[in-house]
Image (cartoon, helix red, strand yellow):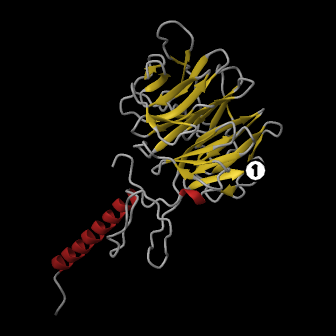
Amino acid sequence: MNALPMKPRFMIRMIRWIVFLGLTITLFSQVALGEIRTPDSSGYPTFNLPLVHPKGSEQPWQGAAPSIQTLAVTPDGIVYAGSFGMGLFRSKDKGQSWKSLNRGLTDPFLLSLAVVPGKHVYAGTMRGGVYRLSLKGEQWEAISQGLEDVEVKSFLVHDGQVYAGTGEGVHRWVEADHHWMKAGIGLEKVLVPGLAILDDGRLLAATSGKGLHHVQLGQTGQSKWIDSQSVFVDPRERLPHRYLRVIAVNQAQHIFLGTQDGGIFRSTDRGVSWVSLSRNLPNDSIRGIVPIKQDVVVATGKGIFRWKHDQQQWVEMNEGLTRLAIQSLTISGTGDWYAGTSSGAFRSDDGGAHWKNISQGFGLQMAPRGPYE
């Protein structure tokens, strides 16, 4: 007799589902923004300052080491690490300790680094353009003249010239004019995540969405970028890929090209033809390429692997890596290997056979804001 009629019972169920869905959407939104709060954590910090001495009983949100998007090493072994949200760090002892160097750096979201030996380190950012720092200084100089609110994804230093791959094509720094100039025409409105150069003066640009382009340096007048018309076909899914991420050239002038999700390709004839090296590579998201003689080492979304030319196979090099989402990879002139990951950095002293976490000096990043907030 006390049973509710069918229609009111249906409405009550609907109200319960609406409330449940509302809470679920709210929770999902907080996760997507990089923060999630418990009901009693209204004071939870959302800024990027590191929490130096967290106490588990008092602060459940202890953060993590920042994502190290880019690394650069000077000829004498000084390491620069660019983070996504906490700016730049420098180490003079192979990562055993780090010093934050952010004075004058207004955008802490770093995407690329380059060193001009004996002079400067250049930093490309998400929204603040380019900054440079004297190798003996601690104050950044903003040098974004000629770059209009674009992300700076890559650098190339060649014959004392600095080239930048940006969201508006490729630019060259002209010191006399203190200004960035277009390096060729035809790559406007396209992101260039990778730059490399051949010994015949051809500058190669790996683009995000428009494949591989090249321009001949040293010509009089404004040169035009040429689409290589190269086809990069994923051997697994048989899909073509034009979203490229990284490019490198070895001493034999073999070109290695990494895609966003289609693996790595190699050309032994200066870009005329290409062969995939990804058939047995565990992950197709290529974030870094370092050629070593006839071998090549790649950083992927699931670790570091080396292509052994004599064995014609990939060898895993992840022992000691507790973070496998690799963001950057570099090998110093002294033979030390450095890897930047989604949370901190690692060093290998034995050619990548074993890795050691060197993130202790970075501090902790607390629920980082997005770069556009």
Left or right: 184, with 252 as reference point: left
Q: Tell me residue 105's x, y (percent).
A: 43, 42
Relative height, residue 353 to residue 13 (above, below) = above
Left or right: 291, with 207 as reference point: right
Residue at position x 52%, y 31% from top? 242
Quarter the N terminus occupies: bottom left
Residue at position x 39%, y 47% from top? 371
Q: Tell me residue 79's x, y (percent).
A: 63, 44
Identified by mark 1, the residue type is: Asp
Residue 195 in view in this figure: no
Q: Tell me residue 321's x, y (percent).
A: 66, 57
Q: Nearer the viewer, residue 153 or 118?
A: 118
Residue at position x 33%, y 76% from top? 40
Packing grade of label 1 (10 A; few <14, some 14-19, many >=20) is: some
Q: Nearer the viewer, residue 55 or 246?
A: 55
* Residue for badge 1: 349
